[in-house]
Amino acid sequence: MAFEKLLSPVRIFELDDEIGKRIEGDGSVKNRSALLEHLQDLGVRMHPATNTLEITDTHVRAENLMTHQEELYEADLVVQALDYRPEKDLEDIFRGCAEKVIAIGDCTGIGNIIGATTDAWEAVWNLT
Ligand SMILES: Cc1cc2nc3c(=O)[nH]c(=O)nc-3n(C[C@H](O)[C@H](O)[C@H](O)COP(=O)(O)OP(=O)(O)OC[C@H]3O[C@@H](n4cnc5c(N)ncnc54)[C@H](O)[C@@H]3O)c2cc1C
């Protein structure tokens, strides 16, 4: 049984039409291709353009967005590494609580530490 589990493939399901597209967007093209090559060597199955619809105790049910067909994959362990989005309404809720409300960092759009600290620095600089 344990041996069978070892043989069951690891799969990556990605809603986008390419795996790791955003890594490329970062300018890290070499990192992306090296990573994809390594995953391929390890036998990881890639499922781009796939929308996961349901995770049960035994399966992942997904829609292939190219064929619009539903697919069912056996799975004994599922790791979710999903997107996140800013909750932009929060800014409106805080508006009016103080004379000046400045939204910075990830709440204005998902970014990184440099963007967040730059926003913070600019906000403080322009306080007066
Ligand atoms: C898994 C992961 C890995 C990352 N790796 C990197 C990396 O390697 N390099 C990089 O540059 N960036 C990375 N980032 C992005 C980086 O963490 C964020 O861009 C940065 O932390 C944004 O800073 P922020 O202050 O805007 O938001 P956050 O750091 O998210 O801080 C917001 C804070 O507000 C608190 N909060 C939320 N709602 C309320 C509320 N109602 N009342 C009070 N407090 C509240 C939260 O608990 C949180 O502590 C990563 C992000 C993730 C999720």
Image (cartoon, rainbow, N blue to C red):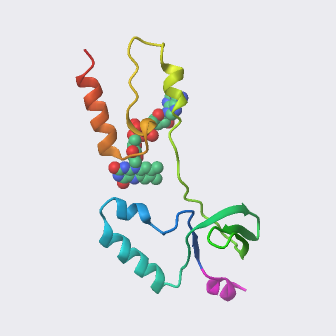
Instruction: Determine the image quadrant of residue 117.
Output: top left
Residue occupying the point 66% across, 63% down? 52
Question: Count of labels shown?
Answer: 0
Residue occupying the point 34% across, 39% down? 116
Q: Work out which residue is located at the far left of the displayed protein and give it.
A: 125
Q: Position of residue 88 (x, y in %)?
A: 51, 33
Instruction: Determine the image quadrant of residue 124.
Output: top left
Q: Is residue 113 left or right of residue 62?
A: left
The correct choice, above or below, for 41 with respect to 53 in the image is below
Q: What secondary structure do most residues of the magenta stretch adopt?
A: helix
Instruction: Determine the image quadrant of residue 126.
Output: top left
Q: Position of residue 35 (x, y in %)?
A: 40, 74
Residue occupying the point 43% across, 64% down? 21
Q: Is residue 115 left or right of residue 103?
A: left
Q: Quadrant of ligand 1?
A: top left
The span picked out in magenta is 1-9
Q: Position of residue 70 (x, y in %)?
A: 73, 70
Q: Quadrant of the C terminus?
A: top left
Q: Is residue 90 left or right of residue 108?
A: right
Q: Position of residue 89 (x, y in %)?
A: 54, 29
Q: Quadrant of the N terminus?
A: bottom right
Residue occupying the point 53% across, 63% down? 16
